[in-house]
Image (spheres, grey):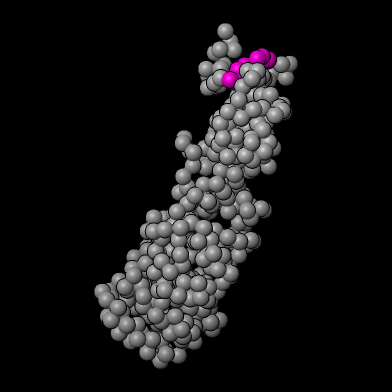
């Protein structure tokens, strides 16, 4: 009676049947199975049906716990002698080929992996973490191989680190869908070449990429212009403004050496007026009356930011940017002149924003999720494991039902 109950619960079908159920001294449930004498099976390689059994091998799979106890399935597993392609071991319907776990156990692990560190999962299910990583990597790799990029036309490029200050990973994303489409070790032009090569494996061609948004990294610029010659580059406005903020801060640092009134005022100049605290607003009001170079640089920053807000067309933006560059060149503020030089050398990509409208908003959202993954695991020493988790959490992969 109990054999029939477990056979129904596990979905075991003829010619396989349960021969014995054992609950041993280690409080483990073991279910043993065999197949009917004279049974024939389908070749797992070519699909030829009604193949004779050549020999057998005893195999074991870890299954979901039976209540709080570990449970295992055992099968005297047949190897078929296929007339077309030789001798091959069958894979029972409850398992993945080459795995020592049942599919239900693996799907349970995958579900946990989206929100729990692998080490914690390993502790929960009482398995070594390397075995858990093999499960997650196998499913993620298989799902990523099936990812279709045939409609990909706009990409964002950004970098992140697997652990604070170490092992950089470059992430490519579909800025329309918000999916990570590729992640690879490094942050140089070679990462772009790697992505271009990968596209061909996913029903895509480099010629279909029409828009790329990224920061002003020379490596990325070189890679994109080489690998995606048909694409227009938009330099993300937030990275441009970040560079501008650095210029303002450099003005403050230089002036502070001779004017101590600027001490402890760094964040006053980095924020926009509407984001200042009451105390910072008072400080800004006081310092603005001191005829400071920093105050002038701050006003230049606000004026440049206004271009992003006010310009409605590329032509309008071009006139406003050119006017601002002329102001910067006459400013006698070296950091601001250096920023103006940066704008000139990246002119078309900065101007492109006013046509494409692309920003790093999607990339920032993805990066936030990646940082959560990294924080949860307290960083990753194995770069491949980090990339696997990026795909699992941010890749929008088609996983088996239930994931």
In this rendered view, identify the residue nearer to me: 73 or 35: 35
Q: Is residue 160 visible?
A: no
| Residue at the image position 63 percent from the left and 43 percent from the top | 133
Is residue 298 shown above or below 149? below
Is residue 348 shown above or below 275? below
| Residue at the image position 36 percent from the left and 75 percent from the top | 352
In this rendered view, identify the residue nearer to me: 34 or 261: 34
Picture coordinates of residue 73, whole percent (x, y): 64, 24
Q: Is residue 52 visible?
A: yes
Picture coordinates of residue 323, whole percent (x, y): 33, 87
Horizontal arrangement in the rendering, residue 24 relative to residue 228 (left or right): right
The single residue placed furthest to the top in the displayed view is 1
| Residue at the image position 39 percent from the left and 55 percent from the top | 177
In this rendered view, identify the residue nearer to me: 151 or 350: 151
Residue 125 found in image quarter: top right
Q: Quadrant of the N terminus?
A: top right
Residue 19 sits inside the magenta stretch: yes
Residue 184 sits inside the magenta stretch: no
| Residue at the image position 46 percent from the left and 36 percent from the top | 401
Picture coordinates of residue 191, whole percent (x, y): 57, 66
Horizontal arrangement in the rendering, residue 94 relative to residue 282 (left or right): right
Horizontal arrangement in the rendering, residue 102 relative to residue 365 (left or right): right
Is residue 38 shown above or below 205? above
State whether the magenta stretch is mostly helix, strand or loop: strand
Horizontal arrangement in the rendering, residue 351 relative to residue 172 (left or right): left
The single residue placed furthest to the right in the displayed view is 25
Picture coordinates of residue 31, whole percent (x, y): 65, 19
Residue 245 found in image quarter: bottom left
Q: Which residues are magenta?
A: 15-23
């Amino acid at each position: 009676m109990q054999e029939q109950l477990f056979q129904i619960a596990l979905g075991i079908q003829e010619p396989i049947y349960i021969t014995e159920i054992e609950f041993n001294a280690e409080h483990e449930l073991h279910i043993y199975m065999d197949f009917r004498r004279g049974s024939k099976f389908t070749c797992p390689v070519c699909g030829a049906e009604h193949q004779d059994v050549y020999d057998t091998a005893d195999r074991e799979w870890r299954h979901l716990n039976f209540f709080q106890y570990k449970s295992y399935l055992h099968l005297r597993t047949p190897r078929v002698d296929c007339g077309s392609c030789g001798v091959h071991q069958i894979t029972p319907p409850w398992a993945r080929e080459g795995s020592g776990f049942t599919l239900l156990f693996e799907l349970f692990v995958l579900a946990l992996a989206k929100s729990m560190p692998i080490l914690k999962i390993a502790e929960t299910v009482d398995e070594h973490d390397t075995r858990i990583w093999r499960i997650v990597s196998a499913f993620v790799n298989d799902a990523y191989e099936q990812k279709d990029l045939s409609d990909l036309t706009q990409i964002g490029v950004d970098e992140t680190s697997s652990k604070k200050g170490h092992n950089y990973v470059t992430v490519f994303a579909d800025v329309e869908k918000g999916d990570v489409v590729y992640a690879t070790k490094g942050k140089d032009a070679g990462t772009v070449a790697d992505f271009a090569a990968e596209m061909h494996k996913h029903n895509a061609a480099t010629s279909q990429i029409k828009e790329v948004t990224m920061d002003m990294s020379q490596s990325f610029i070189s890679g994109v212009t080489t690998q995606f010659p048909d694409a227009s580059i938009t330099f993300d406005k937030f990275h441009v403004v970040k560079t501008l903020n650095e210029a303002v801060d450099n003005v403050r640092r230089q002036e502070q050496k001779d004017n101590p009134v600027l001490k402890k005022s760094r964040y006053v100049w980095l924020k926009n007026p509407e984001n200042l605290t009451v105390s910072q607003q008072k400080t800004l009001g006081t310092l603005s009356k001191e005829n400071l170079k920093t105050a002038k640089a701050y006003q230049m920053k606000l004026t440049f930011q206004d271009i992003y807000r006010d310009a409605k067309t590329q032509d309008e933006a071009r006139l406003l940017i050119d006017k601002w560059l002329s102001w910067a060149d006459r400013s006698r503020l070296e950091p601001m002149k250096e920023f103006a030089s940066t704008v000139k050398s990246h002119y078309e990509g900065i101007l492109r924003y006013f046509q494409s409208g692309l920003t790093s908003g999607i990339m920032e959202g993805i990066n936030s999720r990646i940082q959560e993954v990294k924080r949860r695991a307290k960083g990753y020493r194995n770069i491949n494991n980090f990339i696997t988790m990026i795909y699992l959490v941010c890749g929008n992969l088609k996983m088996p039902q239930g994931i």
